[in-house]
Image (cartoon, rainbow, N blue to C red):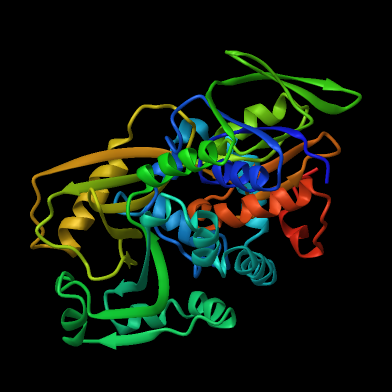
Amino acid sequence: MTAQKIVVVGAGICGLSSAIWLRRAGHDVTLIDKDAPGAGASYGNAGLLAEWGIVPISGPGIAWTGLKYLASRDAPLSIQWGQLPRLAPWLAQFLRNSTDARTREISAALSHLLHDSVDQHRALTRGTLADKWIASSDFGWAYADRTAFENDAYTWQLRRNAGYVPEVIDGPAVQEVEPMLGPATKCLVQLKGSGHIVNPGAYMADLAKVLRDEGGTYRRAEMRDVTMRDGRIAEIITDQGPLLCDVAVLAAGIWSEPLARKLGIKVPLVAERGFHLEFKNPSQAPRTPLMMTGGKFAVNPMAQGLRCAGMVELGGTSPKLSRGPLELLRRNVARMFPDLEYDSVDEWMGYRPSTPDSLPMIGQMRASGVFAAFGHQHIGLTGGPKTGRWVADMIAGQSNAQLAAFDANRFG
């Protein structure tokens, strides 16, 4: 294979993974980002390697559930109503993907991407300084009671179809297994053999060092435009000057949408604003990472504190912090962990890049020489290393019919 000059735009987990695998394939790789590596959603996520994260948010009954959520100040979903005209076409497509048949198709595609996530992260980092941030762990879902778990039967049927068979723990035994859980949790569902990232920000920074150590280049630069020749990418124009390239990878998360427009390609990508609270020097930590199903937030004990992450606010990319979701997250944490004490708490808000079918966009955009690696919604950290490997394979000319569900041109 002939070595090519490749520019990767976006230094989150998908861009870092793509750049590393492309460099290992012998290409001349330059990774650019307007911020530090992993400054966005790749930093602020829950840190979970969610191989089991194969259930799309869309699904049968989501329209009714969404309306109930939007009518409540205590629901994990909110919307910036001023953004509704822009969101309406995306929401219409989202609802069209909520049938049972479509949900099962999406779930099967997600399983193909995610099922070996921990192994993919290990392969990306084996023998490097980044490997130390990957931890093996089990995972648990905290339910109010057995009835609440049984009401989630559709979700668990999809997981069982993919081979994830849970262990269900009831009553006082819940607190014996997970002492941090308060009396609001009377049912705990566990899966064995998962994993998580101990410090996502440090992990991204070390992956950038891995790229440099292996001969790649990282530049702090912002993509401004492109130069096309005969319909193919020839140059990425940045605020630091032009970068010649034979091929480019667009992995800029939510910012991929305006950059794709510079190629003349419109993609239905919206920002799901997500939030986390990170409790410093906590008096308690769970034995394994958890999903608190009542409040729809994840809990992960990290090197720098206890991170509680979740909430969905449909809106734009304004940097203004939304207080409502953060205050709801605080109330839910206090309710679920009544004995938790801590020295201080950090707040964060970021933007999950979301497509209307809950599937990322992976592959060449038309015949432009630009390959998409974005749109991972809630599973970017989990699926990033495999996405990067797939992109490197595609650039090498290897086709895979199983990747049709992620086709970067599927929206026209």
The image shows residue 192, relative to residue 339, as above or below, that is below
Query: Outermost residue, right direction?
Result: 230
Quadrant of res 107:
bottom right
| Foreground of the two, 216 or 380 | 216
**Residue 361 visible in the shown view:** yes
Q: Residue at x 16, y 69 (%)?
A: 180
Asked whether, in this view, residue 168 is left or right of residue 220, the answer is left
Q: Residue at x 16, y 83 (%)?
A: 176
| Foreground of the two, 204 or 142 | 204
Say which quadrant the C terminus sits in: top right
Number of numbered tags placed on the structure image: 0
Q: How far from the left and from the top, in percent, is residue 295?
A: 31, 60
Q: How far from the left and from the top, in percent, is residue 263?
A: 76, 27
Q: Residue at x 37, y 86 (%)?
A: 167
| Foreground of the two, 325 or 401 | 401
Asked whether, in this view, residue 140 is left or right of residue 283, the answer is right
The image shows residue 313, relative to residue 368, as above or below, that is below
| Foreground of the two, 206 or 233 | 206
Asked whether, in this view, residue 143 is left or right of residue 256, the answer is left
Q: How far from the left and from the top, in percent, is residue 192?
A: 40, 79
**Residue 273 visible in the shown view:** no
Q: How far from the left and from the top, in percent, is residue 32?
A: 57, 28
The image shows residue 190, relative to residue 206, as above or below, that is below
